[in-house]
Image (cartoon, rainbow, N blue to C red):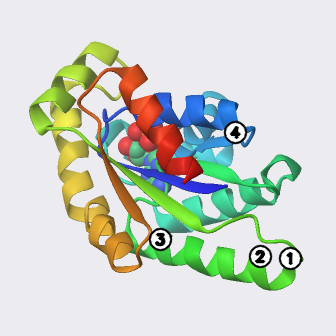
Amino acid sequence: MRLIFLGPPGAGKGTQAAIIAASFGVPHISTGEILRTHVGEETDLGQKAKDYMAQGELVPDQLILDMVEHRLEESDAQNGWILDGFPRNISQADFVAALILKVDREAKNSIGDLKVINLDVPDQILVERLLARGRKDDHEEVIRHRLQVYREQTAPLINYYLDRNQLQSINGNRSMDEITQELKQVVSA
Ligand code: AMP
């Protein structure tokens, strides 16, 4: 299984990615979580990423791409993975596509085609959910900026993956259980 969860901040990507990962036995790889761990541990990467995250800006690709490549090389990711919060722009998406091509060229068995799930949720609901979540970068001003960054840099990935026949959109404005049920069907299909 190779799955990407796309969708604006607050769409429920993290929650659903964790459930699907546990039920299919693949790692849930959240770049935001990995970055928050680096910030907490005050690593080099953490120091460099911190200000971008606090402002709701994307952390520069040059820091993110290495981090993702190394994570995908770990042993638990050899039979599949779920990416949550990555890719966030076209160049990150090109990077994953190239990485998959390279792995498939070298591998004996394919671990499956890439599927991309777009969790669709109206803006007003997103802001409400994010304000309720209360994470460090969940102040109204930063939230609005994260949504703007999403629209400008990440939303173009919807067409990117539609063009490649890899995208499946799911209505994320329903109960958690309903969304999980539909996701399981889509992923197994
Ligand atoms: P998230 O937990 O996915 O909402 O990410 C929190 C913050 O981490 C984002 O607002 C960005 O500053 C940073 N971040 C997470 N993933 C990425 C990524 N793929 N590219 C650049 N920055 C990222």
First of labels 4, 3 by sequence position: 4
Image quarter for residue 33?
A: top right
Q: Residue at x 82, y 57 (%)?
A: 78
Q: Residue at x 30, y 65 (%)?
A: 158
On the picture, is 132 further left or further right than 48?
Answer: left
Image quarter for residue 168?
A: bottom left
In the picture of the structure, the residue carrying the numbered disc 2 is 103
- Please, what is the three-letter code of the amino acid marked with disc 2? Val
Which secondary structure, mark 3?
helix
- Please, what is the three-letter code of the amino acid marked with disc 1? Ala
Nearer the viewer's eye, disc 3 or disc 2? 2
Q: CA distance from mark 2 to mark 4?
A: 21 Å
Q: CA distance from mark 1 to mark 4?
A: 21 Å
Eyeballing the image, is 142 above or below 73?
above
Nearer the viewer's eye, disc 4 or disc 3? 4
Which secondary structure, mark 1?
loop
CB under 8 Å between callouts 3 and 2? no
In the picture of the structure, the residue carrying the numbered disc 3 is 93
How packed mark 2 is, by other alpha carbons closer than 10 Å (few <14, some 14-19, many 20 or more), is some
Q: Position of residue 121 (x, y in %)?
A: 21, 38
CB under 8 Å between callouts 2 and 1? yes
Image quadrant for the C terminus? bottom right
How packed mark 1 is, by other alpha carbons closer than 10 Å (few <14, some 14-19, many 20 or more), is few
First of labels 3, 2 by sequence position: 3
Eyeballing the image, is 33 above or below 159?
above
Is the CB of the residue bearing disc 4 within 8 angstroms of ligand 1? no
In the picture of the structure, the residue carrying the numbered disc 4 is 24
In the picture of the structure, the residue carrying the numbered disc 1 is 107
Nearer the viewer's eye, disc 2 or disc 4? 4
Q: CA distance from mark 3 to mark 2?
A: 15 Å
Q: Which mark is residue 78?
A: none
Which secondary structure, mark 2?
helix
